[in-house]
Amino acid sequence: MCGIVGYRGSRDAPPRPGLLARMAGAIAHRGPDGAGTYTSSGVGLGHRRLSVIDPAGGAQPMSGPDRSTWITFNGEIFNYVELRDELRRKGHSFRTGSDTEVILHLYEEEGEACLLRLNGDFAFAIWDERRQRLFIARDRIGVRPIYYAERPDGFYFASEMKALLEVPGIDAEPDPFAVDQIFTFWVCLPPRTPFRGISELPPGHFITLTPDRMEIRRYWQPAYPDAHSAREWSRPYEERLKEELRALFLDSVKLRLRSDVPYGAYLSGGLDSSLVGAAANRLVDSELRTFSVTFEDPEFDESSLQRKMAAALQARYEAVPVSTDEIGRLFPQVIDSIEQPVLRTGAVPLYRLAGHVRECGVKVVLTGEGADEVFAGYDLFKEAKVRRFVDRQPGSSRRPRLLSRLYPYLPRMQQQSAPFLRAFFSPGGQGAGDPLYSHMPRFRSTAGIKLFYGQETRETLKGYDALADLRDRLPAEFTRWHPLSQAQYLEMTYLLPGYILSSQGDRVAMAHGVESRYPFLDPRLIDFAAQIPPELKLRGLREKHILRESLKDLLPREIGDRPKQPYRAPEGECFVGPQQSDEVRDALSPNTIARGGFFDPGAVQQLVSKFALKGRLGQRDNMALVGVLSTQLWHRAFIGNRDGRTAVPSPITAS
């Protein structure tokens, strides 16, 4: 895993190695093991290296056999061994043992079609001198980030937005429409980012840039069968699916254990990370190292199950306790790493965990993210199913009681009346026919943060409808899919890459030079699972049914049968009271709120006072406080304080 930067200007423009060094220096944390640049006739590629495969021979930027193609690459190609063997049979020869070189040869053999041959997490740029073409691509799901900006003097790209802010003329100007999207969906809808003028290349897309045009095309998206054409379920059919699923998953883990450096696994105590750890443990000879976050508060802590699973694996268990004080103290650093406002604090413990992993000399960790999206594990999927059931008999007083069973880890939900539950889970929007039906309660709840907008923000956003924006982006075939498939598409296309794999994934791990790998996001597994009948993913209210059944022998029964318990961390209480840091106090002060211009200082002060009085509040207030604070900290880090951010390394150059 690495950091990449680059530019494409006019052919007669002089080389800009100093600019590449500044851009790469801004993301040096992504690649502490080395730096390099390549410049030629208006083109520059930069690289910061985290060496995982072929540490001795994989330096970048790397050239093809005749030096007419050059690549700067962030990520891993897990099937590079098989691809290299295939290319050798076709006459290709290799100088290194790296996966980077395999991409170059495959590109020369197949062009842009090479992308569908790559089983991996990647963002890369290839400069093709013969064709005078810059080719930039991102993996199917969006595990690895890539951003770009267009200027009159050229086109620029980078793994993180802070590198683009080193380019003269690219200013850190906030985009209020992007912030409004975050305060609706938790994420920006790509290509929009929180910075006006900086765009994100969406997952499953590539860019081709030639002297006379720039083209952005999609090469992959999640695809589900039409609801009316779903195969009829039978016991033999289910058994065959379980066998295929098991084989694919175990092979996915096996591929992701390819590494020339030490690796470990995150262990949360839940089903997904436990399955990854159990599969990895079967495939390695040495003791598996597991890393876990623990909390003092039993509402969030899962250490007992973590220890139980580690003992079952006979693995080395390393716990990293994270306190509310530490979350409050580290939150500003985390916002600097993830480069955008967030609504939850969950990224902070994972940031702390990645720091511990790196301190232990481990560069690679396997994690369980992706299983909930691929196999329908979230409570939201069950919630939408129950809501549709309730909506079919609007006058029923019994059916709404089913809603209280959805969130057993939220005690107050069990005590609510049927009318309250019906109102709380009411979809709003366009009713059951709304393509966003599954997510409307979440979107509506999240949008409550907009009550804290200041007058200027309200005026700017007047007439903008984030929900309509999202509806307009849905593929034409979306309405033909089963409702569960529709909900899975929304999660996999937006929240997974924009939040789970970004704010809680790549950004916090790579802040410490740690690479996360996701066996559940193997493209073969994703495509296979998309064709599994919905009733085998969500059987009644049992989430991830077929996944549990196909791999149940890998786990203790207590963990294998355990209902979904989402990862959560302390929130509002981390930022009020005696432990409140000076930085947080200043960010939430009326004067600072007024200077930021996003929020109403009076409304924010009332919220802060409410927390100070009660200590812990409900989900909506928690999201509001975290959202306001993170926006303020983001504004200060990137817009109000741009001086002295970058340490420039001494690069290795090639030309």
Image (spheres, rainbow, N blue to C red):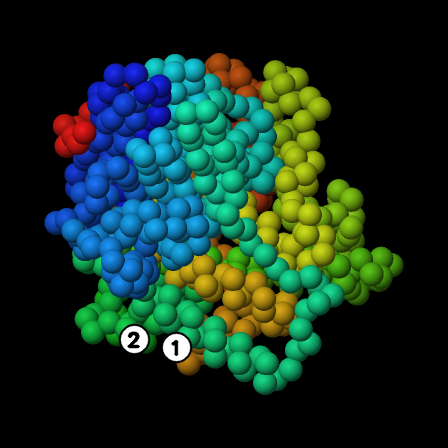
100 lies above or below 125: below
Q: Is residue 368 visible?
A: no
Q: Is residue 24 left or right of residue 437?
A: left
Report the residue marked by disc 1. 554
Helix, strand or loop at disc 1?
helix
> Residue 466's x, y, as percent?
65, 34
Could you tell me residue 200's position as x and y percent?
A: 46, 34
Kindly check if marks 1 and 2 are in contact, taking CB atoms under 8 A apart as contact. Answer: yes
Q: In the image, what residue occupies the spot 52% across and 31% down?
A: 192
Q: Nearer the viewer, mark 1 or mark 2?
A: 2
Residue to which mark 2 is pinned: 282
- Identified by mark 2, the residue type is Arg
Q: Seen in the image, is 514 located left or right of residue 556?
A: left
Residue 42, located in which quarter of the rendered image? top left
Report the residue at 14% width, 28% height from top.
650
Of 308 and 209, nearer the camera is 209
The kind of secondary structure element at disc 2 is: helix
Q: Is residue 653 left or right of residue 411?
A: left
